[in-house]
Amino acid sequence: MDIQQLYYFINIVECDYNLSLAAKKIHISQPALSQFISNFENEKDVQLFNRKQGRLNSLTRAGEMIYQYALQIVKQHEEMQEMVRVEGLKQKGTIRIGLPSLILRVYFSDYFPNLVLNNPNVHLEIIENGSNDLRKKLINGEIDIAILIEPTSLDTKNYEQHVIQIDEMVAFMDPKNPLAQNEKLEWQDLKGYPIATFNSTFMTNHLVTQKLETHSTAHQIQFTSSSWDYLIETTRNKDIVAILPRPVEKFFQSEQTDFRHFRDYIPFNFHLCRSFKKKYTSVENFVFDDLINYFYQPVE
């Protein structure tokens, strides 16, 4: 079987041996699919399927063995295709950069367009996600550079990391919330207040949960989302407190939402990360170095 025929074979099994359904799924005619099965079984003198009343019913022992090989071969073929795509992009000067949506909007909305306009040989593929998912993509080689919230949980022996921004998590609330009377907050001040924050795909969720657990208030997290604007909206005319990165305040009107710093705040620092390699392309080095030079903040 060639790779296309392996796809046909796998789809027949996945469609529970329903040739009509499989044919529709892979966009060929049912007679052509039936002919493929007959030709293979006759030419190779091996039966792939058990039949009942003229219909395919299950895989034979040989069919099951071939099916397992087919799954492996198709998986490897798809991985090879992705590798070819990625290597082709790299040779064209394409760099895949992963970062959280909020960081993209706050810090990079001007930087990335200017970088590409001023350097026509540079092509960027931007991947937005939470830090936890981005770390996995970096480890799996799905992105070249990741901008991750501290702690990155990366092995420093295998990954180059630079702090490029330093900030903090704060408490957002309705101006009429009683906590808005405080100049700064202690974590125990949150007792009795429903809490909103980013969902578990974000590193900040784990940082907030850990901090609240030390004050026995983690159970008060009642609202989670990947959308900071939704989380801010949950506080309007309610006593809900949204714990989010301070840069969120740039995107709302101060008369509708207020925020307070914590005395013992959770850092919101993010790192520029990439894996150590023996050799980088010239474009990879250029983009990485430019990011460091533009954003780097020395830690005091």
Image (cartoon, grey):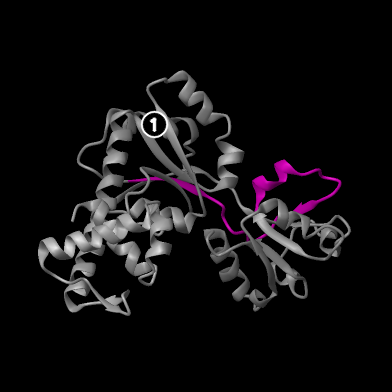
Q: Is residue 262 magenta?
A: yes
Residue at the spot 49% in from the left edge and 35% down from the top edge: 295
Residue at the spot 38% in from the left edge and 72% down from the top edge: 16
From the image, tell me which residue sits under label 1: 287
| Relative depth, front residue between 88 and 291 | 88
| Relative depth, front residue between 223 and 269 | 223
Q: Is residue 299 visible?
A: no
Q: Residues within 10 Å of mark 1 (few under 14, many from 20)?
A: some
- The answer to which quarter of the image holds residue 266 is bottom right
Give coordinates of residue 279: x percent, y percent.
21, 37
| Relative depth, front residue between 179 and 299 | 179
Give coordinates of residue 36: x percent, y percent.
24, 58
Residue range of the region highlighted in magenta in the rendering: 245-274
From the viewer's perspective, is residue 29 above or below residue 253?
Answer: below
Position of the N terminus by quadrant: bottom left
What count of labels does the image hold? 1
Residue at the spot 24% in from the left edge and 43% down from the top edge: 277
Kind of residue at disc 1: Val
Q: Is residue 261 magenta?
A: yes
Left-right relation of 107 to 72: right
From the viewer's perspective, is residue 51 above or below residue 129?
Answer: below
Give coordinates of residue 286: x percent, y percent.
35, 28
Residue at the spot 19% in from the left edge and 52% down from the top edge: 2
> Which element is circle 1 on?
helix
From the viewer's perspective, is residue 168 above or below residue 63?
Answer: above
- The answer to which quarter of the image holds residue 122 is top left
Give coordinates of residue 202: x percent, y percent.
54, 59
| Relative depth, front residue between 30 and 221 | 30
